[in-house]
Image: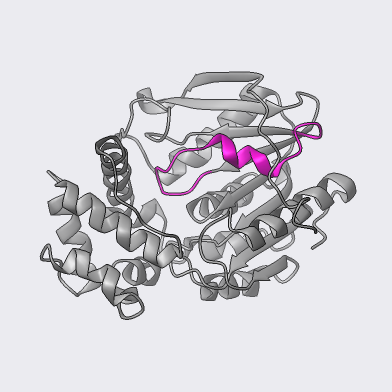
Amino acid sequence: MSAASSALHSPSPPFDCGLLPVSGGHRLYYEQRGVPTGIPVLILHGGPGSGCSPLMAGFFDPAVYRAILLDQRGAGKSRPAGGCDENTTPALIDDIEVLRRHLGIDRWLVMGGSWGATLGILYAAAHPGQLSGLLLRNPFLARATDLDWFFGGARQHHPEAWQGWAALGAPEVPGAMLRWLEACFQSPSAAHVSAWHVWECALAGTPSRALSLAEIDVLQARYRLQLHYFHHACFIAEGGVLAAAERIAALAAPIHILQGLADDVCPARATAALLAKLPNAGCSLVEGVGHDPYAPAMRAATLGLVESFAALGRFAP
C-alpha cells in the first residue's frame, strides 16, 4: 500500500448518535459514521476507560462502512463519567449486545485494540453468531502476569520512565505497586497523573509531553477507572481470555490479529499465546511499531485488512 493510500479516511460527521440506557443507571454514548447501509463495524476502545475518538472511524471508508463507536461505562461521553458502580467486564459485554439489538444489526465486524481486543474476544465467545469478523490489535490478555509486567516488570526496559514513579515513592514489587497506586489515586496529585502518563507512553513507544490541567483531569478519571478494573483482576477469571479464545477457535467468521513488535504495554508474547488457541486466525507482525494504532506501518496494515474485508469478506494481508 502506497503512502498516499495508507492515509486515514476523513471521518464523516455522525449520522446518528445517542445515550443508550443500560443497567446500573449508566447511559452509554454511541455514534454512527459512514453510510447507514454500509458494512456494520463496532469499534471497541482500550483502557479500560479510554473512550472513543472520531479518528478511530478513519480506518473505514465512509462510503462503504457503517462505523459504530461506543464509549464504555464511565468512559468518554458516557454517563456518569468515571462511574465505577456496576462497571464490570460482564456488564460491558452485555452492553455491546444491547447496542447491537438497539441498532437493529444482525451481524457486525468487531475491531478492538489492547483492552478493546480483550472485549472483542470475550464478546465473540458469548455471541459467536453475531460476528461477521474479528480484527484485533495488540491484545491484552488480562492475566496476573500481564498486570505485573505493566506495573513494574517492564521497569528494566524503561528505567528513565520508571524514575517518575520512583521519585514519588513507588515500591518496586508489582503487587505492591498496584496497592500503592490505589492509595495515591484516592487523592492524586498532578505529579502522580503525569508519572503514569510518562510510564504509559514509554511502554507504548509514543512520546510523552507536558499535560494541561484539563488533560490531567481527564487522565485522572481514566486511571481511577483502570484501577477499579485492575483491583478486581479486570473481572475476568485467570486465563479467561485465552479460554474464551479457545471457544471461538472454530468461529465461522474470520479472525485476524495485528501485533506491533515494539509494544511493551501488550507485548508480542500475548499474541503468540492467543494464536496457540486460534490456529485458524491470521496474524500480521508489524516491525518497529509499539502500541500506537496510528503509527504509519500499523495504520497501513490495518487499512489493508479493512479494505480486503470489504472486498472479499475476509482478511487478506
Apparent side of residue 67 relative to residue 215 in the rendered image (left or right): right
> Who is closer to the viewer here, 261 or 172?
261
The total number of labels drawn is 0
Can you say which quadrant of the picture contains the N terminus?
Answer: bottom right
Does the magenta segment cover residue 180?
no
Residue 143 visible to an observer of this rendering: no
Q: Which quadrant would residue 152 be assigned to in this image?
A: bottom left
Apparent side of residue 125 relative to residue 133 in the rendered image (left or right): left
**Above or below — where is 162 with respect to 52?**
below
**Above or below — where is 236 with respect to 8?**
below
Range covered by the magenta-colored residues:
45-65
Does the magenta segment cover residue 54?
yes
Q: Residue at x 34, y 53 (%)?
A: 209
Q: Residue at x 52, y 66 (%)?
A: 290
Residue 122 visible to an observer of this rendering: yes
Q: Mostly what secondary structure, the magenta segment?
A: loop
**Residue 224 image point, x, y percent:** 26, 45
